[in-house]
Image (tube, rainbow, N blue to C red):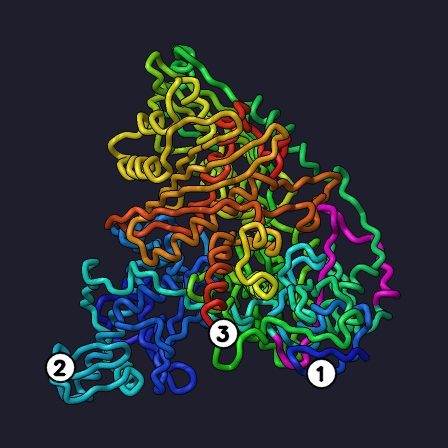
Amino acid sequence: MTGLGIGTGYLATVDVDGTQSGPGENDSVNLTAWINIATDNVITIFVPFVEMGQGTHTGLAQLVAEELGLDLSAGNIRVTHPQEEFAAHTNLTMFLNQRPEEMSGPLSWYGKRFLASMKLSATGASSAVVGNWHAMRHAGAIARQMLQAAAARHLDGKPDDLILDHALFKRADGANSVSFGTIAKAAAKIDPPTDIALKPAAEFSVIGKPIPRMDAAAKITGRGQYGVDVRLPGMAFATVRQAPVFGATIKKVEDKVARSMRGVIDVIIDGDSMIVVADNTWRAFQAAEALEIEYTLPEKPVAGEDFAAAFKARHEAGAFTQSEQPGDAANALSAAAKKIEAEYHTPYLAHATMEPMNSTVWWKPDDTVEVWAPTQSAAMARQVIESVGGASSIKVHVTFAGGGFGRRAEKNFVIHAAKAAKAHKGRPIQLTWSRTEDMQHDVYRPAAIAKLKAGLDENGQLTAFDAVIGTHSVMASFLLRNMDLSSNLTADNTTLEGIAHMPYQVRNRRIAAVEVETSVPIGFWRSVGHSNNAFFVESMIDECAVAAGKDAFDFRLAHLGPQQRRHKKVLETLRDMADWTGRGGNGRGRGVALHESFRSIVGAVIDIDVDSQKQVTLNKVVAVIDCGTIINPRLVEAQVQSGIIFGLTAACFGRIDIADGMVAQENFDSYEMLTLARAPSVEVHLMTNAELPGGVGEPGTPPAAPALANAIFSATGERIRRLPISEAGYAL
Amino acid sequence: MVTLTINGDRQSFDVEAKMPLLWVLRDVANLTGTKFGCGAGLCGACSVLVDGELTRSCVTPVENVEGSDIRTIESLASKQHLSAVQQAWLELDVPQCGYCQPGTIVAVTALLAEAPNPTDDEIDAAITNICRCGTYDRIRKGVRRAAEIVAAT
């Protein structure tokens, strides 16, 4: 850290820019924290977020490349997750729910300073681009100016007379040129500039372009390294068998047979789990199955239906933990010309990432520890090793992740490997969960119940909207499990996200939460609270439109005000793109839903057929997204398609049942997925504007379920108030 | 001892006859391109070709494939060239997390060997791999593009 830190004071060091320059590994230098240039002109862009399919290793690289003048398709560009763990300022948007650009004043300054003091790097909340829109471009611009100054000296010219042409500076008179690699070491000695002008949007040549994915070539050849693909010398392979009943403890284990099985190295009892270490994964799986385990069961094992009962009791007691209540919803409801009431239910859901939970830990004899994990948080992996105790240093390698969706923001897939590795110092241990373990020891999307009431006036306008959302707090479960923090239940913003501050203008509202405690582990699931609340709001709005005798689009548009011009445009565009006529029936149905989440707005229309046997065919989805400035249209399209298929999969099949304290589903036969034959085509239209960028990894998911439910109503006249749709007898 | 011919190489492995091919590939032969997804033949992430036949290696004991020609994702590209399916996948940016794609690419390779210009129904019937990222739209386009590339060569 030279120059800048002293020049502009502490704020710069805690800003999101990451300007630490200095020597790098293997004859290279770092120009800022995010760019490494080797003397052979290989340029590495560090993206401090895990690549789990969302395309962040391409999108964020584009931000750097825009300012650094790089052609990402050239063979000398690498993108990788950094080895170093960065302070949480890269996650400013995730933790403080603000754009860095919007922050100012002393409170923000202390907020940044506080975050920067913690190493809590994580990937989530569709926040990588939102939070680093300036930071990554700044990094590119700082590095470019340093290189330009060094190039000018090298070429004996003025910086302004140089032309930048992919990792090469040329003199305008054509006399000479020099590569980044040649001048990188000299550039690293130059004070980073403090006056950084970013390119105006009109000059973008990388941002906004459909740059091919930087990770695709590795992934289509089998070369890409996921967590399960890590191979180290002398590595052992392990698995874990956790108590199937939540809260159960091990009373007695008979492991003689397992220990005598071929290739078995060790059987370790760890709390309510059994760890089996062998010389390959299959032998570990076989031995884990051969263990005879007796458990002490909890006095009252949790059951799925406990939630509804507890909700009812708390609701009747008026135990609301949060509320938003402008106007007087109760009075407006009793004065309404028409009143609509409905109760909606959603189930627990598993993540079911394609790559099952796993991690690899190498605890060396000198107590230096290395971890390889497909994790959404290197910080969590580090904390696991710290909690085991005795490590003299910890290095976390973040691999590709075979899906994440919130599941990998957890500690529980690293702990058993860490313990086994400590017990077998010097031997790397890769521990992989079976699919059954993965499904039965997930952290689940919470079930939810919505009690909804709406009032319409004589003109069919909403005068009142009353919602009570019963669910489990994601944050409370997450914090207790991962950070040993017991959180105040009132603090969970995810519970009402997507229903509080809804875009529809209704003067009298009451939106309240009833949070129910549970021993079911609850976690972040793609779009989190929005995944439940969008279904509730957009289904209810559809019910209201029907009650008002209005078209679904007209009704929504009539409730959007001047502040919702972007929502309006999305709806109007969607109506055109989908050739909406509003007519359904006789088994042909179309449904619409609109939802804002993670600073982006997505509208979707789904077209379906339903036969007399309730057999559903998903024909086509048309979706429109407004995510502000688009970094890469191809990635945005892919994420919207992905989010919608994810949401439809859950709406069609998704349910985790808990009976006698354990999850009933085990694999993809009992927890079904949409496959190619049953998936609809998804056509995506991108709104173009100059707004700041929004997230794209999650916003496609929330509108999928309500659009489908509304389409079923349009086809059959039956309102879906309970997910999945199979609950009402619909099959695909 | 089990002797297998994997991607043209004949090798002997000191493993149980019942051990699934997937784990011999991944943990013994260190060919990690073939993925573990479900262990029950349900998701297709472990797909390989055995004598040209699409095979789910997680439920295939190695004793069943002794003497067969086993081809994994690692063998589809030559040193210089990607296969037609891989080229199509790259052109269309099919992968997201990419974990299921080796298995899907192998399945599409098998399909195109049988039906160089498959109908939608044939694609639906043949490609049953689960993709949790929901890349199905681009997989379908990728199959068509790969068929074009094959036809043009």
**Alpha-carbon distance for marks 1 and 2?**
59 Å
Mark 1 or mark 2: which is in front?
1
Amino acid type, residue under disc 1 in the picture:
Arg
Residue matched to label 2: A172
Amino acid type, residue under disc 3 in the picture:
Leu
Question: Which residue is at the front of the view, A320 or B105?
Answer: B105
Q: How many marks?
A: 3
Which disc, if any, is residue A94? none
The earlier-in-sequence mark between 1 and 3 is 1
Spot occupied by residue B94 in the image (x, y as percentages of width and height)? 47, 60
The answer to whether residue A573 is left or right of residue A151 is: right
Q: Is residue A631 visible?
A: yes
Task: Identify which residue is drawn at 35% across, 64% down.
Answer: A211
Say whether marks 1 and 3 touch (CB < 8 Å).
Answer: no
Which disc, if any, is residue B10? 1
The answer to whether residue A18 is left or right of residue B28 is: left
Q: Quadrant of residue A46?
A: bottom left
**Dot 1: chain letter:** B
Say whether marks 1 and 2 touch (CB < 8 Å).
Answer: no
Q: Say few, some or many: other residues with alpha carbon within 10 Å of mark 1 (under 14 / 14 to 19 / 20 or more).
A: few
Task: Identify which residue is drawn at 40% across, 13% down.
Answer: A331
**Dot 2: chain letter:** A
Give the magenta part as a residue range.
Answer: A231-258
Placement of A127 over or under A505, stated as above or below: below
Residue matched to label 3: B82
Spot occupied by residue A681 in the image (x, y as percentages of width and height)? 47, 46
Placement of A19 over or under A507, stated as above or below: below
